[in-house]
Image (tube, helix red, strand yellow):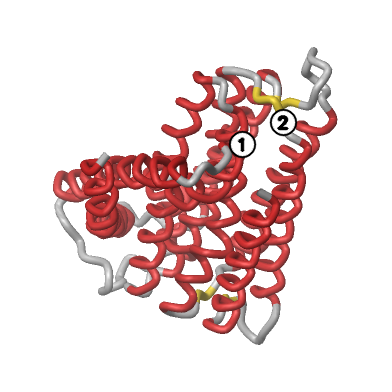
């Protein structure tokens, strides 16, 4: 038990350094191939920082822990918007590109509505209760494929508009070194995230908390730490595209890819109480859109970032009272 606590603390240090490696490696790759930094954030970085959610959900699906798997995704996505974007904006205001609020944020919102509909409509489940069925999972994976196709098209059509290859802030490294940096970052995020989650679970269980509560809070925050650290590091270095692309990309990945894969492995029974969390996720996306369009320039200001963080901790208080 003592070792778990030690690894829990060590995990934070690994996460911070791994995030730095990932941002540096991904930024270098983007500059070398003139790939938009936004696209890098929506693909390489999002894949890497979504690893903890993926591992937790796949294991939970095999064990039949549907509340943990669903709570992890909803909780992580809410934390991504309110906690991570909020904290990143507090470090430095985040300018938002047109494609983000015209395309990526709406896709994230549609994905949330889609999961809510599939879970409650029960169209493809043979059981009597609500569930995200295996067919639902395949459908979510299909939409993930469509999203990745869209990202590819964006990367081919908008290289000059979305990324400045003369940006002196991005350190250009050799390709092997860039790949090594990304690899170390991904592995470090996974290891650090796992140690933190394992320690957090042990701490939570010692206080007699439920699986659903653990999924929505401890696991969700634990698996979102890579996104938090990566986005804050990116924001501190003035790479708002990577910070925002990482968060929005992770949210889309979490629903279409991770939840889709989890449901494909085994149908996930759905608790009606989780509809509150879907509504909260819809509200979070709506608040983000309002923050972006509220002002002379599309951006998330420091004040709005503070509001995001306050809303998030109010939501955590609600979860504690909900039990």
Left or right of 72, for residue 168 = left
Describe the element under mark 1 as helix, strand or loop.
helix
> Label 2: which residue?
270
The disc at residue 18 is none
Q: Position of residue 321 (x, y in %)?
A: 68, 56
Quarter of the view holding residue 211: top right
Residue at 15% x, 52% y: name it: 174
Left or right of 140, for residue 38 = left
Rounded to the nearest angstrom, the CA distance separating label 1 from label 2 is 8 Å
Q: Residue furthest bottom?
A: 296
Q: Indicate the quadrant containing the N terminus: top left, top right, bottom left or bottom right.
A: top left
Residue at 72% x, 31% y: name it: 270
Describe the element under mark 2 as helix, strand or loop.
loop
Q: Are marks 1 and 2 in contact (CB under 8 Å)?
A: yes
**Mark 1, other Cα within 10 Å: few <14 / some 14–19 / many ≥20:** many
**Mark 2, other Cα within 10 Å: few <14 / some 14–19 / many ≥20:** many
The mark tally for this picture is 2
The disc at residue 70 is 1
Q: Is residue 66 above or below residue 100?
A: above
Left or right of 171, for residue 88 = right
Residue at 55% x, 55% y: name it: 248
Residue at 60% x, 59% y: name it: 316
Q: Foreground residue, 227 or 310?
A: 310
Q: Residue furthest top?
A: 126
Q: Foreground residue, 277 or 77?
A: 277
Is any part of residue 156 visible from this angle?
Answer: no
Q: Is residue 209 above or below residue 14?
A: above
Q: Foreground residue, 275 or 45?
A: 275
Q: Position of residue 194 (x, y in %)?
A: 34, 40
Q: Position of residue 95 (x, y in %)?
A: 52, 75
Q: Position of residue 230 (x, y in %)?
A: 36, 59
Q: Foreground residue, 297 or 114?
A: 114
């Amino acid at each position: 038990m003592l070792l778990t606590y030690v690894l829990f603390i060590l995990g934070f240090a690994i996460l911070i350094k791994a995030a730095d490696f990932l941002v540096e490696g991904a930024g270098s790759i983007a500059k070398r191939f003139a790939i938009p930094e936004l696209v890098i954030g929506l693909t390489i970085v999002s894949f890497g920082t979504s690893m903890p959610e993926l591992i937790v959900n796949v294991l939970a699906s095999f064990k039949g822990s549907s509340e943990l798997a669903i709570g992890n995704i909803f909780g992580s996505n809410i934390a991504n918007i309110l906690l991570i974007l909020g904290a990143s904006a507090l470090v430095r205001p985040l300018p938002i590109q047109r494609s983000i609020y015209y395309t990526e944020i709406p896709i994230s919102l549609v994905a949330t509505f889609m999961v809510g509909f599939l879970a409650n409509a029960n169209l493809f489940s043979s059981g009597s209760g609500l569930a995200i069925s295996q067919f639902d999972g395949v459908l979510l994976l299909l939409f993930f494929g469509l999203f990745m196709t869209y990202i590819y098209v964006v990367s081919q059509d908008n290289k000059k508009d979305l990324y400045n290859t003369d940006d002196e802030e991005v350190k250009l490294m050799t390709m092997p070194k860039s790949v090594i940096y990304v690899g170390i970052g991904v592995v470090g995020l996974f290891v650090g995230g796992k140690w933190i989650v394992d320690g957090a679970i042990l701490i939570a269980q010692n206080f007699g908390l439920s699986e659903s509560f653990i999924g929505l809070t401890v696991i969700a925050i634990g698996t979102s730490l890579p996104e938090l650290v990566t986005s804050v590091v990116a924001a501190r270095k003035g790479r708002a595209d990577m910070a925002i692309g990482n968060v929005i990309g992770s949210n889309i990945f979490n629903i279409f890819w991770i939840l889709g894969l989890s449901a494909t492995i085994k149908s996930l029974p759905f608790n009606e109480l989780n509809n509150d969390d879907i509504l909260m996720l819809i509200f979070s996306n709506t608040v983000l859109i309002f923050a972006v369009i509220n002002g002379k320039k599309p951006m998330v200001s420091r004040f709005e970032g503070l509001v995001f963080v306050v809303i998030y901790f109010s939501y955590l208080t609600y979860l504690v009272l909900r039990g």
